[in-house]
Amino acid sequence: MIGEVIKNFLRFLVFTLIQVSIIKHLDLGIFITPFPYVIFILMLPINMDKGWVILIAFICGLIIDMFYNSLGINAAACVLTAFFRPWVLRLYAPKGEYDSSSRPTLSSMGLGWMFSYAGTLVLLHHFMLFYLEAFTFSGFFITLAKVILSSMATLSLILLSQVFMEKTSVR
């Protein structure tokens, strides 16, 4: 139990540091802003209590908001992601259900499942994030382009990090 908490905390630290020290300073144009820190919420254990997942997501988003000076939009998007996570897990559940100790990772669930699971939640997260940031529907299609392109970039980074984590854990 303590080992899992430490692993999750270290994972949170690493993804937060990558987000605020590297990704934040990348200039990929106005339409692409990846937020790979979301993987931390996605990788929490499947059997973790929904209330804890929402609380952890809120804290994670709030910390990102402090670095981005974004007045709570990351926290709101993370809470929404955590709230819908159990439904998305049920939507993509394998036929034999999940193992009680399983974690939603590329190595344990496969590429197709991870792409669907992470893609759905990343799209939901980014939709909430970018529309709260815009706070208007007047530029609906421009914001939608940001949502789609940023989601694709984020999902690519998430899958790449999953491959990297899998390779380092094998060694």
Image (tube, helix red, strand yellow):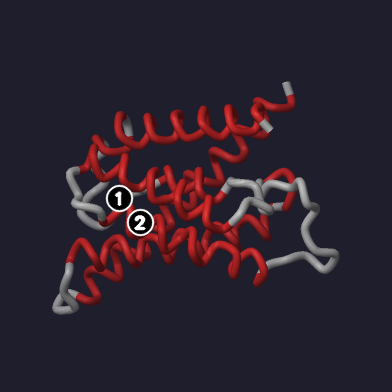
Q: Which residue is mark 1?
A: 33
Q: Which quarter of the rendered picture does the C terminus lie within?
A: top right
Q: Is residue 124 left or right of residue 90?
A: left
Residue 131 rendering spot, x and y as whole percentages = 25, 68
CA neighbours of label 2 inside 10 A, class few (<14), some (14 to 19), many (20+): many
Residue 140 rendering spot, x and y as whole percentages = 22, 76
Q: Is there CB contact under 8 Å for labels 1 and 2?
A: yes
Q: Tell me the CA gap for discs 1 and 2.
A: 5 Å
CA neighbours of label 1 inside 10 A, class few (<14), some (14 to 19), many (20+): many
Which residue is pictured at 44% across the width and 35% down the height?
15
Residue 163 rendering spot, x and y as whole percentages = 62, 38
Answer above or below: position of 170 versus 33: above
- Say which label, 1 or 2, has the lower sequence index: 1
Residue 76, quarter of the rendered image = bottom left
> Which amino acid does the dot numbered 2 rest on?
Ser
Which residue is pictured at 74% across the width and 47% down the height?
102
Which residue is pictured at 85% across the width and 64% down the height?
96
Q: Which quarter of the rendered picture does the N terminus lie within?
A: top right
Residue 18 rendering spot, x and y as whole percentages = 38, 32
Q: Is residue 80 left or right of residue 65?
A: right
How many numbered marks does the figure carry? 2
Q: Which mark is residue 150?
A: 2
Which residue is pictured at 48% across the width and 52% down the height?
155
Q: Secondary structure at mark 1?
A: loop
> Which amino acid does the dot numbered 1 rest on?
Thr
136 or 75: nearer the viewer: 75
Q: Secondary structure at mark 2?
A: helix
